[in-house]
Image (cartoon, helix red, strand yellow):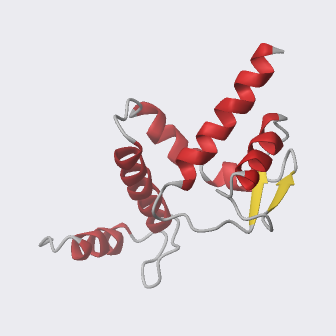
Amino acid sequence: MLSAIRSKLAAKRFFKKMLKAKYIGQLRVINLDKNPAYPFAIEELKVEKVLDKKGKIRQVKYLNNLVEQDHRGVKKITNATLGYKSFYTAGKTIRGIKIMRMIDKGQVKGVNKNDVIMQNKFVASLFEIAV
């Protein structure tokens, strides 16, 4: 019983901390797995007016599988670099890794998937580095 209460409070603390991030606006839909602590935390945040009452929770066990599969490469890299001192540094590092993965997968306009030379030139142009 005590562990269930702790997990609900931990979920609430996590959501509050996440919602303080500058890049997160008011959420329309929140996709979650089936953790029973999440609905409690979300409802508490709605009562405290941290979250909009119109926001919906979508709890589906396997909803995020495609997203998780896409992030598998990012997870491999970030697990090796654990030990971040702040959310800010972790966020910046993970964002950089995700962008590099997007370039590698050919999701950047004008940069082909298997064209390593063009990818290098694109990254160099971002940082104004002579190649």
Residue furthest to the bottom: 110
| Rendered image quadrant of residue 9 | top right
Residue at 63%, 68% (x, y): give it. Answer: 26
Q: Is residue 73 visible?
A: no
**Quadrant (top left, top right, bottom left, bottom right) of the C terminus:** bottom left
Residue at 43%, 85% (x, y): give it. Answer: 110
Residue furthest to the front: 48
Residue 3, given in percent of the width and then of the height, sits at 76, 16
Residue furthest to the left: 130
Task: Classify 60 as above or below 111.
Answer: above
Residue at 40%, 71% (x, y): give it. Answer: 115
Q: Is residue 29 visible?
A: yes
**Quadrant (top left, top right, bottom left, bottom right) of the N terminus:** top right
Residue 18, given in percent of the width and then of the height, sits at 55, 49
Is 85 left or right of 2, judged from the image as shown? left
| Rendered image quadrant of residue 123 | bottom left
Task: Classify 33 as above or below 57.
Answer: above
Residue 87, given in percent of the width and then of the height, sits at 42, 44
User: Camera-side residue: 120 or 38?
Assistant: 38
Is 47 left or right of 115, judged from the image as shown? right
User: Camera-side residue: 40 or 96?
Assistant: 40
Residue at 70%, 50% (x, y): give it. Answer: 45
